[in-house]
Amino acid sequence: MDSQKWVWIILFTCFYLKPAISNDLSTITWCTVSNAEQRKCNDFSRAVNRTASFKVTLSCQQAADKDKCMDLLDTGRADLLTLDPGEVYIAGRYNSLVPVMAEVYGSEETSGYYAVVVARESLNIRTLADLRDKKACFPGIGQMAGWVIPISVLIDKDIIEVIDCNNLIKTAASFFGPSCAPNSLIDKYNPTGDNPMHMCDLCAGDKSTRCSGSDPYANFDGAFNCFVNGGDIAFVKHTTVDEMTASESYRGPHKNQLKLICPTGFTSSVDSYKTCNWGYVPSHAVVTTSAAHPDQKFLYQRFLSQAASKFGARWNDGGGRRWQDNSNPDTIGSTFSLFTYNEKYEGRNLLFQDLTVNLVPLEESQQTFSGYLGSVEKTFQQKLQKCPIPSARLCVVSDQEMKKCQKMKTAFRARMLRPDLVCIKGFSQINCMQLIRENAADLVVLDAGDIYRAGQKYNLMPIVAEQYDLEEPAYYVIAVARQPDKDTDLLYLKGKRSCHTGIGMAAGWVIPMSFLLSSERMRSYGCDSAHAAAEFFQKSCVPGALSREYSVVGDTQYNTLCDLCHGSSSYFCSKSSHEPFFGHTGALRCLVEGGGEIAFVKHTTILENTAGKNQDWWSRPMMPDDFELLCRDGTRAPYDMHETCNLGKVASNAIVTDRMKPKEYINAYIDLFLYAQQYYGSKYSEEFTFKMFVSEDGFSDLIFQDATQQLKVVPESRRDYHEYLGRDFLQAMRIVDCTASSSYVTASIMNVAFLLLALIFCNQSIYR
């Protein structure tokens, strides 16, 4: 009986108390974006709170702009906000907000409006191309009628050339002259911080509001005022001209002195908006968080419907004239109007558009940005994603890198980053270089040693460099030994067991080998550095040492270069993440558990893999003090003295591409990764967020080095591999690999030959 009793109690709680809980919505918080909106919202709040029929109270939370409001709703610190349909798209895609109510306009009770372009009659416009360099006034970046539609049409018609696939503001700025485009400098639309300032030249705000969503020239009324006070054209809705020119305080050109610019390039009268418009826009919508329970959304809808009934106007011309007020016995309600323009607030279209006459609830199928916008999203939003560069094909060299690349591709697509990232699997770094030369791939991330080979033999160049913890994109090469092992130093390494990052790589091969060869600690075998290392060290792990690509043809005399490696099957001693001892972390692991006595790595490697930074079982007990640095003079130094105890400084890893690629392609590749790092460059973001500079558990340095803090553009003056790598590294390459100087020798011979031919030709010409 006791068990049955508890079953009935649980059922009673589920079916009877749940509605009571879900209906207990005591306070609704509205987010406002200006002082004027806050004043109107406070009046709205008082009207609601003093009307007995409302079961909730209303509070108002002011934010700097709608972008901040979206964040407040997304984090549960506010509940409701009215957005333009373009902003509904942004809020849904990036802030998980959903529309629940839509505005209805005018005596005809329409569910939207037309996007139009207004100009003075005197402006000479024959084609859309004549809009170039005109002073443009926009209501705000991202707004449907005033930004998305006109810019998408101009791009689709090839009037505006896409300059930056991921930044429409830069693209628009290349076409228009001085303008006012509110929000063009906020982080969301200016992630790299270099948007052209002339897109704010016409704006009128003070230092704190200029070119923001609170600028006096923001929104439709602001864009029209911008136009009246110096602009050539304004992107507004079809009712804006009548709303603004009907005001008693209006001092601009008469309506008859204005015209509409049609998307055909022709012009027409202001009243011809039905035939001379750029697109039809759904009405503005009230949004809330997608996390809200359906019962909660229903309560919001009921509240808003009740508010529209009590404080709205049945018909409204947007200019302050109302034909019929809804009956309202409350005295506060009789003086407060939810929709119509009121001069006391010193602003138009506050909380809702002034032309609004009612609010209608949206069906569940419409409560997503795509469900609400319907075909408008595909018609216009997708046109904005036009990119003349079809794809960026990134070449990777292991299954683990391919897996990360696919995740990166998905993450880039979620942020609509262009060009589309495509992942190509190569079987080695050199194979990736070949694929790029053959136009079967576009990009690969390479170590300095491989950048040399890529530039010398495949005509590739670095365009984006990794930056670690130094002020420049570079790192120190260090030699590391275990702290208790006092018998190992740089002056007496013969017969020692060595751990290297990989054959031909800067820190693990080129720099240490050049030091040992140039200081005559190691015998040279005719520039065959692999032979020299095999004779010098007792055993080693040099991933890739047995590969034919590095001129070492599987001779048994070189087998000792892989004796310490741990890879399995065909991946044994491979120059990829398939080999556990590959790379900087792999070389340190070789020192810890592979029997090595010295490891050659970059200066960040020790701290990356000790004191709990690396959770792999082999590194868990390791502390930084367990290692010491070996200095050039035979002494030792603590692990953090790399600035004074190192083998040299090397240019960091970099993304490389074909030198012959058109400039617009190279710029698109650069922009893709610079924008991507704004979203995915943090190592400390949420657990399920993709991280560009973090490798999956059990692996390290997949595609990018895990030590990377940011990516930096390689200046054009340094994109030649000689300039990027520097004189010291080039000298080290010549010591380690005799073929490294062949390009110079060949070039010198060619130069001498041309000079001799020129002298002979000149001599013959003189004596004729």
Image: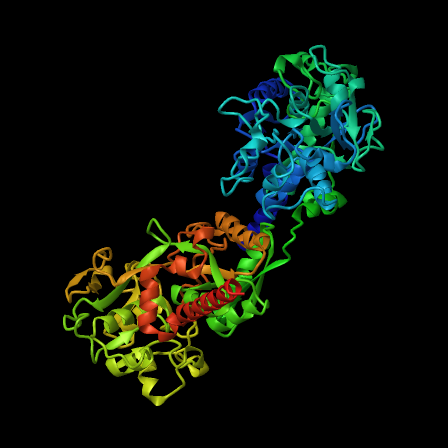
From the image, which quarter does the N terminus lie in? bottom right
Q: How many marks?
A: 0
Q: Is residue 51 left or right of residue 721?
A: right
Question: Relative to 152, does residue 709 appear above or below in the rendering?
Answer: below
Q: Position of residue 177 (x, y in %)?
A: 63, 32
Q: Residue at x 55, y 70 (%)?
A: 435
Of all residues shown, which one is farthest toward the bottom?
556
Q: Position of residue 413 (x, y in %)?
A: 60, 54
| Residue 182 falls left or right of residue 327 | left
Q: Nearer the viewer, residue 639 or 504?
A: 504
Using the rendered view, name the quadrant where residue 20 is placed: top right
Residue at the spot 22% in from the left edge and 78% down from the top edge: 496
Taking depth in this image into account, of 158 and 421 the one nearest to the observer is 158
Answer above or below: position of 333 versus 729.
above
Q: Is residue 679 left or right of residue 252?
A: left
Q: Which image quadrant: the C terminus? A: bottom right
Specify whether residue 9 is in view. Answer: yes
Instruction: Name the residue located 66 percent from the left edge and 48 percent from the top edge.
Output: 385
Image quadrant where residue 582 sits? bottom left
Is residue 293 visible in the rendered image? The answer is no
Above or below, 487 relative to 379: below
> Does residue 368 sit above or below 120 in this rendering?
below
Where is residue 466? Give x, y as percent.
41, 55
Could you tell me residue 42's position as x and y percent?
58, 19
Residue 265: quarter of image = top right
